[in-house]
Amino acid sequence: METVLLYVVGVVIIALGLALSIALHEIGHLLPAKLFGVRVSQYMIGFGPTLWSKRKGETEYGVKAIPLGGYVSMAGMYPPAKPGEKARTSSTGFFQSMVQDARTANAETVPEGQEHRTFYRLPVWKRIIIMAGGPFMNLLIAVALFAVVLCGFGVQQVSTTVGSVSECLIPASAEQRDCAPSDPAAPAAAAGILPGDTLVSVDGQAISSWQDSTAIIQKSAGEPIDIVVKRDGKNIDVVATPALTERYVFDDNGEVATGSDGELLTEQVGMLGITAAYKAVPQPPSAVLPAVGDNITAVTGIILNLPQRLVDVANAAFGPEERDPNGPMSVVGVGRIAGEVTSINTIPIADRAAYLIGLVASVNVALLVFNLVPLMPLDGGHIAGAVWEGIRRFFAKLFGRRDPGPFDAARFIPITFGVVILLGGMSLLLIYADIVKPISLL
């Protein structure tokens, strides 16, 4: 029962973190819009039927039933048809009707006498600030949360403390994986080294990192060496003789190296049969932005290869293939991962908290990058439209031509409709895959 409750706690924490991130994203649009005088009629978290709302001034603030996003309704997102351009009716085509309906619905939100407070009348740079405000807010959230994780909790790094002591030594190429009763004890176990001991010196050399001890042990096969460990605050002297045994050779990427024949490479080295414990080491503030940058790069790579990634997800969901642990997942998958982390009692509470905070930070990076994709109805689509308008007006002024007017985003409503359908299909696929073949940490 305790495991189930912890699982639910993890899911709830991620759900709240996602909802708060969405709310702050929309505030990133709301604040500059009001600062620049745009009339904002609604600030909503979610879609569908309204569960709760309250009007303050001219803006209605509320929460809707489907918590998969949010929106800020600003007057004049789409400019009216140009003078002399006749509005088309539904009889001339479905897509033309969609364009006109979008203009009509948007125009109805502009009270008479407040036409100057419409979005499309703002200078290009103000429109870019408003639309970039949401992703920028996600960036600020990500930086703040990564700072908490890296500088507050720290990063797990190898310490000079013994994490485990093997009962025996098994060569890397051996089919045997468990110690048999007839196997001799590993040198460290025979010498009396215990998990939790901290290495002070090995063969007379002070140890400042685990790599220092490994280098000495590997070249001392068959030779007794003096080792000083700290246990319960006291230094204890032991003597151990590293045994010559076989281990895999690793390349610069941390993977097992292979020879020209494709076989895994091994080497003979001295070993005691000890592994290092990990400890959380707080990082300097200078490590935060590079970490956020690496996260942004990783998410960008996923989005650039999204079609192939979705094919892989579909093959896994409807076939025997396994899910890519580094591939895309839905909010269902993120919630499941959060539940698994909080339910693992063997992980310290601080480490679980750090993982959840880092997960929310990564979700905000995903929201940042995804919303900057230059497609309507995403923020990046509106930004791209404003930039294109600025370019057109610049060259019109440069060559003494007539001002081309505001960029007509309403003409892209059919494309927006298609993008929404694609995003909906992608979401359904990921949710289905996260249910039938989820990515798991266990």
Image (cartoon, rainbow, N blue to C red):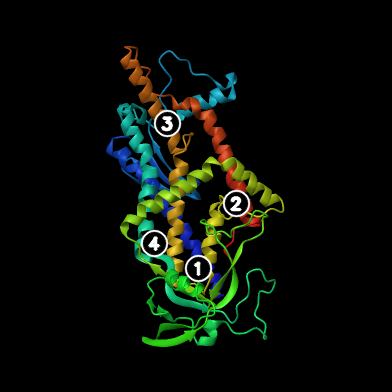
- Marks 1 and 2, how far apart in space? 21 Å
Query: In the figure, is residue 336 to the left or right of 405?
Result: right
Residue at image position (38%, 24%) is 389
Of mark 1 and mark 4, the one earlier in the sequence is 4
Residue marked by disc 3: 384
Tell me if residue 46 can be seen: no
- Marks 4 and 2, how far apart in space? 28 Å
Residue marked by disc 2: 431
Residue marked by disc 4: 149
Q: Secondary structure at mark 3?
A: helix
Of mark 3 and mark 4, the one earlier in the sequence is 4
Residue at image position (46%, 46%) is 297
- Depth check: 370 or 47 in front? 370
Q: Secondary structure at mark 2?
A: helix
Residue at image position (57%, 75%) is 1
- Marks 2 and 3, how far apart in space? 30 Å
Q: Quadrant of residue 243?
A: bottom right
- Marks 1 and 3, how far apart in space? 41 Å
Residue marked by disc 1: 342
**Residue at the far front in the pictured view:** 223
- Marks 3 and 4, how far apart in space? 34 Å
For disc 2, the neighbor class at 10 Å (few under 14, some 14 to 19, many from 20) is some
Of mark 4 and mark 2, the one earlier in the sequence is 4
- The correct choice, above or below, for 176 with respect to 320 in the image is below
Discs 3/4, front: 4
Under mark 3, the amino acid is Ala
Counting from the top left corner in percent of width and height, residue 308 is at 61, 42
